[in-house]
Structure formats: C-alpha cells, structure tokens
Amino acid sequence: MTILRIHSLFLLLLMATLLWSNNTSEEANNDILSWDVLAKVETIEKDLLLVPKFSEDVKTLDGQEIQLRGYIMPLDQAKEQKHFILSANPVAGCYFCVPGGPESMVEVKAKKKVKFGYNPITISGTLELLADDPMGMYYRLTDAQVVE
C-alpha cells in the first residue's frame, strides 16, 4: 500500500470513530452533560492573556455534580490514571495531536485510579470553571469516579 492509501484509510477510520461516538446511547441519557454545553465559551484577551468567558448556561454548572462521557488522555505512562484529561474526541493514536480546543477537554482528578483505555468512559464529579488556569484549561472535574 502506498502512503496515501494508508493515510486515507486512517482518516476514514477516524471519521467513523467520531461518527460512532456521537451517535451512541449517551445522547439518550439525560444525566450526561453534552459537550455542546461546555463549548458555550468564548476566548477573550485579558491582561495580554487569552482567558475563557463562560456563557450563563455554563456558569450555572460551576460547583455542580455532573456526568460527562469522553476519552482518556493520560498525563503519564501508567496503566491506571488518577489525574488525566477527558476529551470529547478520541486521541486516535496520535498523542502529539491535540484533539480539540480547551472547551473540549476537562482536567480530571479522580478519587480512585481509572484504568486507561481507548473506549469512551462516563465519569461523574464536581465541575470547576477555571477562569485563569496557567495551563490553559477551562474546566476541572474533582472527586471524579467512573460511572458503571
């Protein structure tokens, strides 16, 4: 196979994965917060920094217990993670490629270690809005745990 065919096959598989993940039963479960809600944020410049300006819908979630479904982006090489990023989109085998902007990722601090995998997980925890996080994150989920 040529490089072009391999690249095309990879893109096709990535698109199929994204379509499948958006059409799973998560939308039927009203307890799971939609990533579309977290996307209701604008990036503005403040004191020479880019910071989030959260919509009123998002502001009401600050400090609330939520459930979110997404993909683990590990922050180290361990098989189990207690501190990781939950992404709306799969990593798709490229760990050097960020799968979206800060509105599509949540920093997670779990109560117990979570086994890393490539399939989406549902996790619950307390949502924090991060107005000026030095790492550029907009959201953090604390006391998080996997929902079975």
Image (cartoon, rainbow, N blue to C red):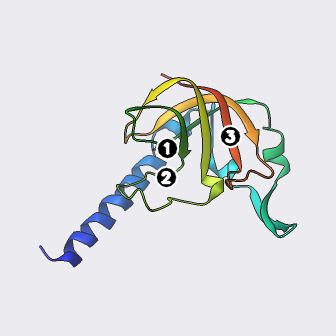
Rounded to the nearest whole Å, what is the CA distance between mark 3 and mark 2?
17 Å
Q: Which residue is drawn at 78% across and 46% down?
A: 58
Query: Counting other residues with Cα less than 10 Å from the Cα at mark 2, is it few (<14), some (14-19), or many (20 or more)?
Result: many
Q: In the rendered structure, which amino acid carries the disc numbered 3?
A: Arg
**Where is residue 10, by image quadrant?**
bottom left
Q: Which of marks 3 and 2 is nearer the N terminus?
A: 2
Tell me if label 3 and label 1 are in contact, CB under 8 Å. Answer: no
Q: In the rendered structure, which amino acid carries the disc numbered 1?
A: Leu
Closer to the camera: disc 3 or disc 1? Answer: 1
Q: In the rendered structure, which amino acid carries the disc numbered 2?
A: Asn
Tell me if label 1 and label 2 are in contact, CB under 8 Å. Answer: no
Q: Which of marks 1 and 2 is nearer the N terminus?
A: 1
Q: In which quarter of the image is the N terminus?
A: bottom left
Write down the residue under mark 3: 140
* Residue 115 in the figure: left or right of residue 131: left
- Which x, y percent locates residue 82? 52, 30
Rounded to the nearest whole Å, what is the CA distance between mark 3 and mark 1?
14 Å
**Where is residue 43, by image quadrant?**
bottom right
